[in-house]
């Protein structure tokens, strides 16, 4: 049997890979307007980074992590020898913990300086049960803003998230932005205790996992997908009734800024995000089109305690992450995925064997001038080369034969207008460049949401 990709993983074939590349390019262009710089952290970290940063009791850490062991460590483990702390590593299940670790390690967010803004992109790994929109290796783009405590930072981040989705081609009215405040160290413990009491008092109506959550992580019960639990938990104490004055003020200011920015949002007092580090503002964007149960395309929140957990001085922070595979499913369902794999701008065809090295050199020269050129490497006849040029979607075929070589002028045949011109290299470059600017003018007209290429 031939080998297959692992369950929950996906090969990104060119069309799909190109869609992701374009999402990354659009992120890069937009995030720069908000002052974000790219930061790349390793795909695996010491497990402690995730245990400390995300929380031991979260599903992500306690159930879904992929541990990484060297062969040597595996062998020693099999012989009953203990592992050294630095040998316990895991593939990153999300991006924030690694960024927080890097920011503290490299002293990137010092008190008294302007807020530090970083974005990242890459694979994340979670050992979940695969289903539509839920993979074991998936791609996220995320941002982290460190050092900013003001509600305007929360609102700015949410505005950026929604603008990004819009630039990608998801209309505002197809998305639901849900927000909540999870309180802080002042008010959250009392809420947590009340939710715990509620779970214990209503244990009979809840699934065994929610019952266990009473002692490990009661707030996670709000995320339970069991319909009986979800129904019962609508009666559980709500954080919004228990926020302390400063959290209430912060939350009100965030909402007022979102309203000023003309963003529609829905307050959901039961929105708790899966990772332990959140304080105050949390948000999630949901879309129905193209997704089943996994309908969140992005989310995030404020994590004012996270950097301290990594040994920094108190440093507020906030961030979001979006899932690229889910965005692609949504764009497809909305008919807004418009990815064109680039075609060569010109196909250089040799009339006979003697002209092949000239065709090769013309390709080299054209590429050195920044144009995409393709040629045949399989000894096709001229007719087949022209057919191939057409199949590749090349608008021009440049024909090189003995006569053309002698004159230093080559036949540029338009495969769309079916006309021919005899031109020297510089003239060919001018014609091809003129076509590029005409085509990119059309592409620009398709923004936002246009993901076409010339
Ligand atoms: P989270 O880190 O859980 O807040 O997830 C942020 C975003 O990543 C979600 O809104 C999804 O779009 C995406 N995501 C999370 N888990 C998965 C997964 N297993 N497969 C695909 N996308 C995911």
Image: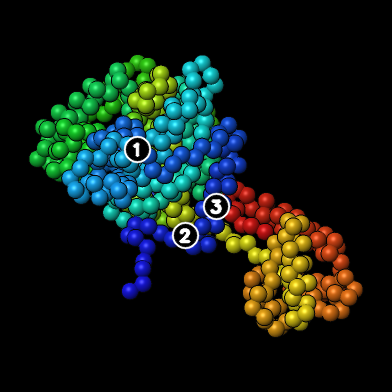
What residue is drawn where x is 67% and y is 80%?
A: 379
Which of label 3 and label 1 is nearer to you?
A: 1
Label 2's element?
Answer: loop
Please say if the residues under marks 3 and 2 sit with CB atoms less than 8 Å apart. no
Q: Indicate the quadrant where residue 59 lies.
A: top left
Q: Earlier in the sequence, mark 3 or mark 1?
A: 3
Color style of the picture: rainbow
Taking depth in this image into account, of 310 and 85 the one nearest to the observer is 85
Q: Is mark 2 within 8 Å of ligand 1?
A: no
Which residue is located at x 52 percent, y 24 percent? 115
Left or right, residue 454 beside residue 40: right
Per the image, label 1 sits on a secondary structure element best described as strand
Within 10 Å of disc 2 (Cα), the crowding (few <14, some 14-19, many 20+) is few
Mark linked to residue 12: 2
The x, y position of residue 444, in whole percent, is 67, 51
| Residue drawn at (71%, 78%) of the image | 386
Q: Nearer the viewer, mark 1 or mark 2?
A: 1
Going by the image, does 196 lie left or right of 149? left
Say the numbered circle drawn on residue 46: 1
Residue furthest right as drawn: 407
Q: Is mark 3 within 8 Å of ligand 1?
A: no
Q: Is 385 on the left-hand or right-hand side of 410? A: left
Quarter of the rendering occupied by the N terminus: bottom left
Is residue 115 depicted above or below 443 in this figure? above
Q: Secondary structure at mark 3?
A: helix
Residue at which label 3 appears: 21
């Amino acid at each position: 049997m031939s080998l297959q990709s692992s369950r929950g993983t996906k090969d990104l074939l060119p069309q799909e890979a190109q869609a992701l590349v374009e999402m990354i390019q659009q992120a890069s262009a937009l995030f720069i307007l908000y002052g974000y710089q790219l930061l790349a952290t390793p795909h695996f970290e010491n497990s402690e980074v995730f245990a400390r940063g995300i929380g031991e009791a979260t599903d992500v850490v306690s159930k879904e992590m992929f541990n990484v062991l060297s062969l040597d460590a595996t062998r020693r483990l099999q012989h009953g020898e203990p592992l050294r702390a630095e040998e316990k590593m895991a593939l990153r299940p999300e991006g924030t913990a690694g960024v927080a670790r890097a920011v503290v390690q490299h002293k990137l967010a010092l008190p008294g300086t302007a807020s530090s803004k970083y974005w990242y992109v890459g694979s994340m790994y979670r050992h979940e049960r695969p289903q539509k929109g839920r993979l074991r290796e998936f791609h996220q783009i995320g941002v982290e803003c460190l050092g900013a405590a003001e509600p305007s930072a929360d609102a700015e981040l949410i505005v950026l998230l929604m603008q990004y989705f819009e630039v990608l081609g998801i209309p505002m009215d197809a998305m639901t932005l849900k927000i909540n405040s999870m309180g802080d160290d002042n008010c959250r413990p009392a809420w947590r205790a009340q939710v715990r009491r509620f779970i214990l008092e209503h244990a009979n109506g809840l699934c065994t996992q929610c019952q266990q959550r009473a002692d490990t992580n009661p707030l996670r019960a709000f995320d339970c997908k069991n319909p009986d639990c979800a129904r019962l938990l609508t009666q559980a104490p709500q954080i919004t009734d228990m926020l302390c004055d400063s959290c209430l003020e912060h939350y009100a200011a965030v909402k007022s800024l979102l309203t000023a920015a003309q963003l529609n949002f829905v307050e959901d007092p039961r929105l708790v995000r899966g990772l332990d580090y959140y304080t105050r503002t949390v948000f999630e964007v949901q879309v129905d089109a193209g997704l089943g149960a996994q309908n969140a395309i992005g989310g995030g929140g404020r994590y004012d305690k996270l950097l301290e957990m990594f040994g920094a001085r108190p440093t507020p922070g906030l961030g979001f992450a979006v899932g690229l595979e889910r965005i692609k499913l949504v764009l497809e369902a909305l008919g807004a995925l418009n990815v064109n794999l680039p075609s060569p701008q010109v196909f250089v065809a040799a009339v006979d064997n003697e002209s092949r090295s000239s065709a090769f050199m013309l390709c080299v020269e054209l590429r050195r001038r920044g144009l995409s050129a393709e040629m045949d490497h399989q000894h096709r006849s001229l007719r087949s080369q022209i057919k191939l040029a057409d199949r590749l979607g090349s608008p021009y075929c440049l024909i090189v034969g003995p006569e053309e070589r002698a004159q230093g002028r080559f036949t540029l045949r338009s495969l769309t207008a079916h006309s021919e011109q005899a031109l020297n290299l510089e003239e060919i470059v001018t014609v091809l460049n003129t076509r590029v600017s005409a085509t990119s003018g059309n592409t620009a007209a398709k923004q936002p949401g246009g993901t076409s290429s010339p």
